[in-house]
């Protein structure tokens, strides 16, 4: 049997009085009713009617035994007492239910978390009506579906989360009518359509009787509260009224909690939006400050180091500036930035971030590892990021999800370097990226400005050097005064360095040599060389500094020859010619990438002067027959001759050096005598042979012993 509540149903109000049975007649007793009942007996009867314990008919008869009432009157009095007792019991039960209802609503009203509130709501409804199963289905206003949200007493795994399509089952009926609906036998219910999936879930749970009441917020259905039993049960008006009343109060609490949750969410969103706006305003203020600082740098004539310092200070990060070869040029950290600037005088090549191994100066160490185990992998990552930034003009993350970004410094299609920013106290966002890109543009502008100034200064110094090396004494006469106007004291110039390089590399080499020589030096191109005049008093040290600087800048073999400067200005040209002559001879000796001095190779320069052809001709003229013998027969006469000369013309010592028997050495010396002539060991002849052997071994791989 099933039913549904109407507007006149007892379930329509929790506070309505329970229905009462017709009361016995209360008209005055007639004389035929018998004698009157004593007051004590009446009081006892009233006490029995209001007692919480059960009162049977025998006890009532005992109370009326002395009243003299006839049996039919006693029966009527007993009926009246039982009626009064039933009504009193109903009122007491209703009082307990209302007390429990009030307590539950007060508890629910203190909860703010919607999920916790739904769980507690079902628990209190379960305790209130005392059914086997209690659950709440939430109404979806978009799809009009009901979904089981919270349950208590269920065992079937398919029951939680069960979806009820619109208009299906008892839940659909409650949602549509907005009135309580119940059935004592679910599977015989006919007032609502059945759904196979719902019926299967109800059967798995073993539900037989079911009562559903709506949760209403005004005219809006927000859910349906259900109480069910696993046996057939006819729900009484009191049960329906009680669950309806609880649902009405619970709906108000639930709707309030939802509104508060929405208000809290709105407040959180507003706070987040405000925080985001505050961060954006702060970022814009930082960007404006950086813009002002960078503009001032341009007007003051600042350099890349000042850009790194300003950017690191504003963004509270570590800024590394790479040059065109992607080698570290300068590093700066602002407040909250990670790491620290390199110590003064630290070799930039020791912190190389991206140059190829061939371009690094020999003996330098890899770059600081910024989170990459392999420095080579990091160098590749830097190059890829710089290439991508060069194409896009934007900041590029150095690694996915990393804390570093790279932005290329470009002028047109020319790569001037890059900025590497390592995030510190300030989280990088779009504004910070745009600020870094702006800083890269300023760095490019300053770099071009410095290049223009350096080129102009280099032109002036090149002209001074050209005048100093001119044949015309009049041009040399005014060099000292003009140089002093540029801050150069010619009387303090102590060493010169001649750098031998291909013509297309000399301009870049001159700039690199200028950085090595410092502001007090003179650098320029002369004849086939780059010439540097420095204040360094040691020619070897001067050649080493210039060689290192040019080698690192170009990534190309460099031959640098140093010499004492001599008298300025008249002696400069002769010393340059002498160093140039040495630079021409050394390649013939196999020396192409080193720093040397004219004194080290003075004998060769004195013998052959300029020209590689004269060296080759001399060696051929002195050792031709021996070289031909070795070439034709795969012999080792030249190696034996070199060891013989190195071991003071001792055949025994030569054999030990070559791991040969003395007789083998003597046989080879006899063959050499046949090829070079009987007087080959004469002093003057032996001197020329010794020089030729030394040159031959410098220009070719040393043959091994047979």
Image: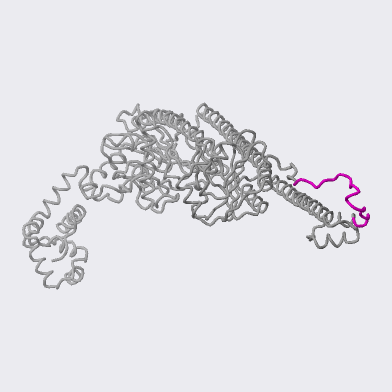
Of 528 and 107, the residue lying toward us: 107
Main secondary structure type of the part rendered in magenta: loop
Which residue ends up furthest to the front in the rendered image?
Answer: 32
Segment colored magenta: 21-41
Q: Is residue 565 visible?
A: no
- Closest to the observer, 186 or 681: 186
Question: Which of these two is toward me, 696 or 332?
Answer: 332
Residue in view at x 15 percent, y 62 percent: 641
Please provide percent x and percent y for residue 194: 48, 44
Residue 250 magenta-highlighted: no
Residue 114 image point, x, y percent: 62, 45
What colour scheme was applied to this rendering of the protein? one colour
**In the image, residue 40 lies in the stretch drawn in magenta:** yes
Q: Is residue 314 left or right of 664 when viewed as pictured?
A: right
Relative height, residue 412 to residue 381 (above, below): above
Choose top left, top right, bottom left or bottom right for residue 454: top left
Regarding residue 271, the answer to whether it shows in the image is yes
- Quadrant into which the C terminus falls: bottom left
Asked which quadrant contains residue 213, the reply is: top right
Q: Where does the image place residue 609, in percent across and percent down from the top left?
A: 22, 44
Left or right position of 226 against 302:
right
Whole-percent x, y for residue 79 in the image: 79, 53
Counting labels gives 0
Residue 456 shown left or right of residue 654 in the figure: right
């Amino acid at each position: 049997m099933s039913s549904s509540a109407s507007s006149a149903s007892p379930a329509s109000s929790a506070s309505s009085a329970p229905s009462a049975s017709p009361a016995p007649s209360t008209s005055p007793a007639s004389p035929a009713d018998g004698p009157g009942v004593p007051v004590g007996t009446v009081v006892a009867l009233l006490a029995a009617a209001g007692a919480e314990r059960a009162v049977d008919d025998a006890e009532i008869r005992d109370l009326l035994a002395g009243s003299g009432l006839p049996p039919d009157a006693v029966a009527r009095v007993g009926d009246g007492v039982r009626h009064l007792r039933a009504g009193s019991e109903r009122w007491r039960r209703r009082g307990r239910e209302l007390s429990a209802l009030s307590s539950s609503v007060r508890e629910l009203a203190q909860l703010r978390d919607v999920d916790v509130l739904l769980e507690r709501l079902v628990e209190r409804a379960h305790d209130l009506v005392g059914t086997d199963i209690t659950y709440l289905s939430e109404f979806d206003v978009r799809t009009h579906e009901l979904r089981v949200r919270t349950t208590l007493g269920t065992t079937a795994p398919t029951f939680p989360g069960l979806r009820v399509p619109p208009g299906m089952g008892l839940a659909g009926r409650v949602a549509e009518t907005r009135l309580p609906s119940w059935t004592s036998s679910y599977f015989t219910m006919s007032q609502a359509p059945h759904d196979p999936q719902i019926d299967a879930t109800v059967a798995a749970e073993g539900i037989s009787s079911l009562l559903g009441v709506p949760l209403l917020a005004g005219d809006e259905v927000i859910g349906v509260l259900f109480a069910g039993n696993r046996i057939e049960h006819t729900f009484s008006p009191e049960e329906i009224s009680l669950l309806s009343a609880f649902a009405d109060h619970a709906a108000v609490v639930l709707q309030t909690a939802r509104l508060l949750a929405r208000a809290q969410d709105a407040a959180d969103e507003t706070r987040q939006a405000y925080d985001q706006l505050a961060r954006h305003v702060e970022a814009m203020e930082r960007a404006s400050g950086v813009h002002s600082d960078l503009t001032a740098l341009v007007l003051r004539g600042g350099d890349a180091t000042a850009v790194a310092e300003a950017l690191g200070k504003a963004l509270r990060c570590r800024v590394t500036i790479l040059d065109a070869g992607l080698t570290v040029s300068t590093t700066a950290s602002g407040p909250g930035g990670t790491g620290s600037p390199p110590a003064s005088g630290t070799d930039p090549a020791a912190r190389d971030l991206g140059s190829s191994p061939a371009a690094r100066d020999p003996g330098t160490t890899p770059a600081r590892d910024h989170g990459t185990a392999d420095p080579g992998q990091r160098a590749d990552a830097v190059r890829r990021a710089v290439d991508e930034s060069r194409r896009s003009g934007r900041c590029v993350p150095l690694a996915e999800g990393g804390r570093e970004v790279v932005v290329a410094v470009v002028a047109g299609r020319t790569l001037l370097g890059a900025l590497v920013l390592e995030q510190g106290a300030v989280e990088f966002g779009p504004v910070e990226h745009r600020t870094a890109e702006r800083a890269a543009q300023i760095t490019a502008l300053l770099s071009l400005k410095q290049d223009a100034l350096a080129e102009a200064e280099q032109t002036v110094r090149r002209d001074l050097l050209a005048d100093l090396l001119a044949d015309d004494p009049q041009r040399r006469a005014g060099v000292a005064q003009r140089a002093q106007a540029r801050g150069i004291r010619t009387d303090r110039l102590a060493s010169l360095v001649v750098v031998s390089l291909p013509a297309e590399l000399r301009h870049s080499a001159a700039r690199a040599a200028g950085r090595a020589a410092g502001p007090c030096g003179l650098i320029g191109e002369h004849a086939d060389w780059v010439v540097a005049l420095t204040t360094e008093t040691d020619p070897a040290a001067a050649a080493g500094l210039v060689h290192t600087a040019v080698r690192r800048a170009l990534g190309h073999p460099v031959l640098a020859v140093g010499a004492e400067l001599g008298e300025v200005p008249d002696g400069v040209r002769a010393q340059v010619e002498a160093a140039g002559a040495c630079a021409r001879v050394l390649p013939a000796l196999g020396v192409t990438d080193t720093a040397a001095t004219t004194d080290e190779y003075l004998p060769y320069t004195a013998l052959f002067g300029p020209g590689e052809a004269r060296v080759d001709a001399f060696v051929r003229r002195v050792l031709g027959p021996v070289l031909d013998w070795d070439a034709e027969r795969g012999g080792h006469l030249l190696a034996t001759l070199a060891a013989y000369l190195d071991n003071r013309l001792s055949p025994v010592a030569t054999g030990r050096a070559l791991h040969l028997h003395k007789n083998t050495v003597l046989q080879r010396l006899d063959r050499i005598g046949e090829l070079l002539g009987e007087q080959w060991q004469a002093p003057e002849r032996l001197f020329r042979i010794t020089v030729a052997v030394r040159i031959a071994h410098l220009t070719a791989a040393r043959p091994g012993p047979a």
